[in-house]
Image (spheres, rainbow, N blue to C red):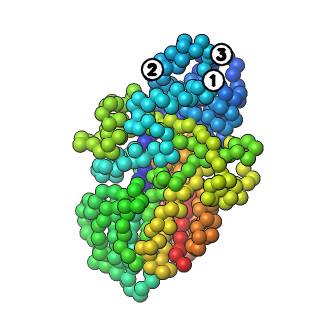
Amino acid sequence: MYIKSAAIYNYTYWRGLFKGQPDRGRSGPGTPWFIQPQTGLPVQAKPQMLQKIHWENNPNIEALLISHMPHVDDIFLFTPELKRLMSAHRENSGQQLDSQIATQIAIKEAHFSPTANFTPDAFNQINALYYSQQDFAFYNRLGLARAFDDCPPLTRAIAYLMKSKATSQGKLDITELSIGAKAHAWVETANHLSDLEIHLTATDIKDPKYHFDKLDFIPQNLTIKYQIANMLNLSSVKLPANQDIIYCTYLFDTIWMRNDLHLIKGEDGQWFQQLFRVKVTELAPHRDRFVQQLKNAHSPTLLDRHDFEAIMIEHITVPFDIAAFEHGKQIKEVHEDKKPGFSLNFPGGLIESIQYLTKYLKPGGCFILGEIAAHAENQDIVMRPCEKTGLIARFQVEDYVLAKAILEALGYAVDIMTFDKLADKYLLKGWEGEYKIEDVKLINGNPNSCVVVITRK
């Protein structure tokens, strides 16, 4: 299942993972390498080594992999400027580069990046530009997610779930965050709930009325208000008061919020965090212009998908003090049995958003999140969990289990229902016979796809 609102970077970049073996001829034969299962990236068996590897999108594009210790590595685009800086250091110092100095030099080489700094949420530079043009983002059929749009039994089950959460008889007040190109699903939902008056507030980063104007008709029991709400800037989001439900699909699975963290478990109880930087490779048809567009999160001209396909994400790995982290204890408890090298995405942005938006719910109101969809069209693609949005859900089920533990400690009731459990609860027995085989398979054959219900107490 694809991700509904993922930036095209996420759809294309992972076709360019460094899956191939490194070019051993340039660093001497016999250097042992292996593919680390949790990350899908080649990791050198010997610590503190440098290695050039090739980008699968184009074998002529090189990246530099710097291994500091087991499970701790940095990756940079190997630009001509970076080569020049490293050569200059060797000539001036008379010494070969070690991993620390190489990383310091590579961090400073920020040509063709919208910003020089490495941050946890660098991906949102891509998302902000991508969503600035709605036709480009949602209606060019670039492989974005359609499960919550185009799976009739799932739409029906969620409709009945929503009905069960109505706090007033005959009426449902609901806000959908980041609705995207999913307006037509509300026609089906309203038809299923014909005995309810549905008061919908549709929100998105741009005016969501754009999506509803494409509908042929709107059912009489559905009234819609439109509101801009930019979830990339949570503190700016204002919603109507006294909502029964705040609903979203793929939202937290798509954008990196400020408290989202990609963490790696190291040796001897150590933990590390990865930080990211956007780089535009020479494959971009409009490289200089595209870097400026990313910097401004705006383009007066139509975006070119080929520019997005030329994006590479650099990362650095830094120590993380999990003992000092507010939720460090829960992270260690949930992942106590994991071996060194295990990586996870901590959904801090989801937790922060739930706490911030709760004030817009009625007492007993709830959030309904359709977020997890761990299914790829090409199962051979090797992916890392930190950027799976677009082809595979970025958060895994166990990340939501961790969020559940934290939110329950904060006083919420949390229920994680797989699609098949949702159907068992809200659809009549034998529902499978009413729908297409592919829709039935989507629900019954997708154990990592869930709906999360978070209820305010």
What's the distance in space between the residues labelled 2 and 1, CA to CA? 19 Å
Residue 455, image x, y percentages: 53, 74
Q: Nearer the viewer, residue 33 or 343?
A: 343
SS class of the residue under badge 1? Answer: loop
The correct choice, above or below, for 27 with respect to 100 in the image is above
Q: Residue at x 61, y 34 (%)?
A: 73
SS class of the residue under badge 3? Answer: loop
Q: Nearer the viewer, residue 374 or 133?
A: 133
Residue bearing the label numbered 1: 98
Q: Nearer the viewer, residue 270 or 398?
A: 270
Residue 429, image x, y percentages: 56, 75
Q: Nearer the viewer, residue 322 or 385?
A: 322
Of the two numbered discs 1 and 3 on the same chain, state the one appearing first in sequence. 3
Residue bearing the label numbered 3: 28
SS class of the residue under badge 2? Answer: helix
Q: Amino acid at mark 3?
A: Gly
- Find residue 443 and report its image quarter: bottom right
- Find residue 168 and report its image quarter: bottom left
